[in-house]
Amino acid sequence: MGTILKYLVGADLGTTGVKLYVVDYEGRIVNVVRKSYELIFQDPRLIEQNPDDWWAAFISCLKKVAKRYNVSAIALSSQANTLLLLNERGHLLSNAISWLDQRSFKEVNELIESFGSKYLHQKTGMIPNPGFTAPKLLWLKKNKRNLLSKAKKILFSPQSYIVYKLTGEVAVDRSLASFSMLYDLSKRTWFSEILEYIGVDSNLLPDVYYSYEVVGYVKNEIASRLGLSTGIPVVIGAHDQCCATLGAGVYSQGPVVDSTGTAGVVFYVAEKLPREIPESLLVYHYVFQDTWAILGTLSASGALINWLIEFTGEKFSHEKLEREAEKIPAGSDGVIVIPYFSGSFRPDVPTGAKGAILGLTLFHKPHHVYRAVMEAIAFELKYYLETIRSLGYPLSEVIAVGGGAKSRLWRKIKANVFELPVLKPEITDTAPLGACILAGIGSGIFKNIGEAVKIVSFEEKIKPNKDLVNTYRKLYEKYLDLSKKICLEYCEI
């Protein structure tokens, strides 16, 4: 008899849907399944989701592959800071409050006034913002006290809910725990001061696991219903940005992951926690022991490209704009974009910063603005790279992932702006692949991390061009100066 092939399943539980990979032990993706779910808009600031929609979408995806493949382990990649409450029977008390929700802006200000913004940032690694779980809990305490009082468990990610439904265990991994503003980085445990202030007992929070740990096993009744083998281990997985980084093959210092989706992120894996965290950076646990994630972000990246296409009345496709943008020189013939169409996390830019397009004349066409957007986002991300470099960490190369990685022009611009080689993996949607790697590590399929990341392969490396590097250095200095001046002058408009 021949050897029975076995497979790993990694599911990315995103903001608007699930994407599930089935991967063999050599790293070949043999199936991809997707299922969307909705955001529920009560008004522009109140954004929720029904966690049972996550579960239905996940089960729908798993069911499509369960009987076709001999699954040996499952792991999850997940969005963060989407808050939900369970009662004593493990049932939902309400919809989940999305990480996109902005209702708790007053509570953010209250926490800043009570603790100080710098203290909160240094303690938790998070820049105080309504997107995080801590201010959401304080909002519930002030506005839905009866609802919060009924909670026997507080979860804040689809990861925890899917793990609970699959295995019966109430758990969270260290990356998502420490991305909540409820976690003390230096003590590596829940942040008791903020929990006491909010009035929430830490016993209500999930048990914390390393991202590669087996948290439980698929319940027999679920396995039977789907056609899975019994006793399949569930490895808890990690925050989606962490999984995307692991799926790009990064597990130690040196490489930077440039993740371009709706937002733009530069992600660095450090072996030591920074002594003092710069104002502009987020810091939290990475997927392995004694490794840390350092993250700089711009809220609108791919979203800004999509906005531009919609703004032109969709007369121009990505492909047409890219073709024309490749023909014009670095600097976009004088067009400069300030990319704060959804704000900025830079400490030298005021709260309430807005976007701008500068230098337009009757000569310019949409493809000039298209290229200028790409350059501006590269400049903004360079700011965070330089901040990471200032901490003494070595930067060796950039690995581009996400939807934006498909643009060769953008990768070329970034190589010259960042002054680093930019690599493109064969698989650019790397979060589900990172979850598969964690499934393989946690279940013992891979002997070590080095063996696990061998399944990641690359198809192109773009090296910086000396002349373009010099051009972009001058443009970057001009961009930094303009972005501060424009926002200081006009952010209140």
Image (cartoon, rainbow, N blue to C red):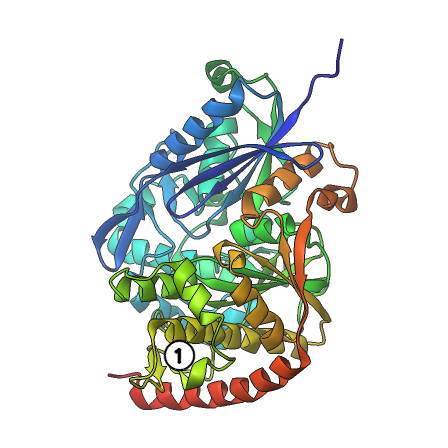
472 versus 49 height, above or below: below
Give residue 394's position: percent from left, percent from top.
Answer: 73, 71
- Residue 124 appears in the picture as rendered: no
Give residue 376's position: percent from left, percent from top.
Answer: 46, 76
434 versus 413 height, above or below: above
Which residue is the extreme one toward the top? 1
Answer left or right for 311 relative to 62.
left
Q: Nearer the viewer, residue 79 or 244?
A: 244
Residue at mark 1: 337
Answer left or right for 244 relative to 33.
right
Give residue 247's position: percent from left, percent from top.
Answer: 62, 48
Quarter holding residue 355: bottom left
Answer left or right for 449 relative to 269.
right
Q: How many marks?
A: 1
Quarter holding residue 408: bottom right
Going 48% across and 16% down the picture, which residue do you hit? 221
Q: Nearer the viewer, residue 412 or 432?
A: 412
Q: Nearer the viewer, residue 444 or 454?
A: 454
| Quadrant of the rendering where the N terminus is positioned | top right
Going 40% across and 79% down the picture, which residue do you hit? 337
| Quadrant of the rendering where the C terminus is positioned | bottom left
Going 40% across and 83% down the picture, which residue do you hit? 335
Give residue 77's position: percent from left, percent from top.
Answer: 53, 44
- Inspect the image, locate mark 1, and give the three-letter code of the amino acid beneath it: Val
- Residue 12 appears in the picture as rendered: yes
Quarter holding residue 245: bottom right
Q: Residues within 10 Å of mark 1 (few under 14, many from 20)?
A: many
Answer left or right for 257 relative to 336.
right
Going 31% across and 53% down the picture, which residue do you hit? 140
Which residue is the extreme one toward the left? 43
Mark 1: secondary structure: strand
